[in-house]
Image (tube, rainbow, N blue to C red):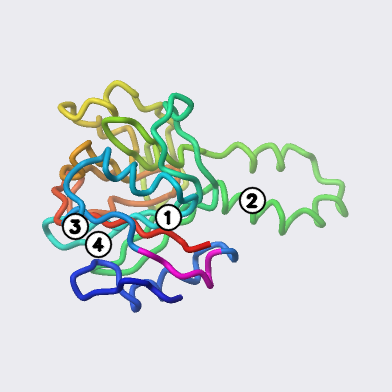
Amino acid sequence: MPIKDSSDDYILNYQLMKLLNRHLSASHCYQSLSLVYSLTKHGASLSTFYENVQNYDATVLIIEDSSHYVFGVYVCEPWNPTVDHSFYYGSALSGVFTLKPNFHYYPSIAALNYKILSSNYQIINQNNTSPNLIQTLNHSNTYFQLSLPESIAIGAGQLINPNSAQTTMVDPSLSQLSNPTNTIFPNSGVAIYLDKYLKNGQSYPSATFGSPTLASETEFTCFNVECWAFNE
C-alpha cells in the first residue's frame, strides 16, 4: 500500500503499514494513505483534528506515547462530534493494534462473532440447530468509536481477564469522557482515550476488541499523534 507524503519524521512508515495491511477490509487494502493530521505539524487541538479529518470515512489513527510505544485504531466511519454522535457508533470492521515494541492486531469481537456465525451458517441449517446460537453470537459489544467535543474514545466494557472470554459490560459515563479533568474509571474498558489537547490518554483492557492495555501504561502522555486517511 503506497503512503503519500512519507517521511522519516512520521510515525507510520511503509514497513509498519505492511503489517497492518492484511487486517484491513478488502476495500482499503490497495488504497493509498495520506497524512491528514499530525500533533507535531498541526498543533495540539482536537478541534483541528476534527476539521482536518471530517471529510474522510476511513482512517488510521496512530499514537506514539512518551515511552515510544506505538499503537492505534483503524476505523471505517468519520470522526465527527455532532449531536448524533454523543454516543458510541462505528463499524465492526474497526480494530485496535500495537506496532511497537511488538505488532498485534485486535479485531472487534463483533467481527469475530460474525465470522463464526457465517462459517457455521450451513451447519446450523443442516443440523436444525437451535437459533439460540445465532442470538448469542449477535449479542456483541458495539462500543467502537466515540467523538465528543472534549475527547475521543475507542472501545468500552471491562475485560476482566484479557486471556479469557470473561467480560463485564460497563456503560462509560459520557460526563467523564467529555471532561478532560476527570480520570476515566479503570473499569470503563476504554481501549484508547485522548483528551481535547491530544496530549494525555488512557488505555485499558477492552471487551470491545478483547485487547490488553495498548500503551506503555494505562495513563500515558502522547509524544505524537497522526491520522492517515484512505484516498478513495
C-alpha span from label 3 to label 2: 39 Å
Q: Quadrant of residue 227?
A: bottom left
C-alpha span from label 1 to label 4: 16 Å
The disc at residue 102 is none
Mark 3 or 4, which is nearer the eye? 3
Residue 168 in the image: state x and y as whole percent. Answer: 42, 33
Report crowding for label 4: few under 14, some 14 to 19, many 20 or more residues within 10 A (C-alpha). Answer: many
Q: Is residue 141 left or right of residue 54?
A: right
Q: Considering only order in the chain, which callout, 4 or 1, is on the residue closer to the N terminus?
A: 1
C-alpha span from label 2 to label 4: 29 Å
Magenta stretch containing residue 200, yes or no? Answer: no
Report crowding for label 1: few under 14, some 14 to 19, many 20 or more residues within 10 A (C-alpha). Answer: many
Q: Quadrant of residue 60?
A: bottom left
Magenta-highlighted residues: 28-34
In this view, 87 is above or below 208: above
Mark 1 or 2, which is nearer the eye? 1
Q: Amino acid at mark 4?
A: Val
Q: Is residue 64 left or right of residue 145?
A: left
Q: Which residue is mark 3?
A: 41
Q: Considering only order in the chain, which callout, 2 or 3, is on the residue closer to the N terminus?
A: 3
In this view, 15 is above or below 74: below
Report crowding for label 3: few under 14, some 14 to 19, many 20 or more residues within 10 A (C-alpha). Answer: few
In this view, 165 is above or below 88: below
The disc at residue 114 is 2
Q: Is residue 183 left or right of residue 51?
A: left
Q: Amino acid at mark 3?
A: Lys
Residue at x 18% of width, y 55% of height:
216
Q: In the image shown, does 59 or 139 lie closer to the viewer?
A: 59
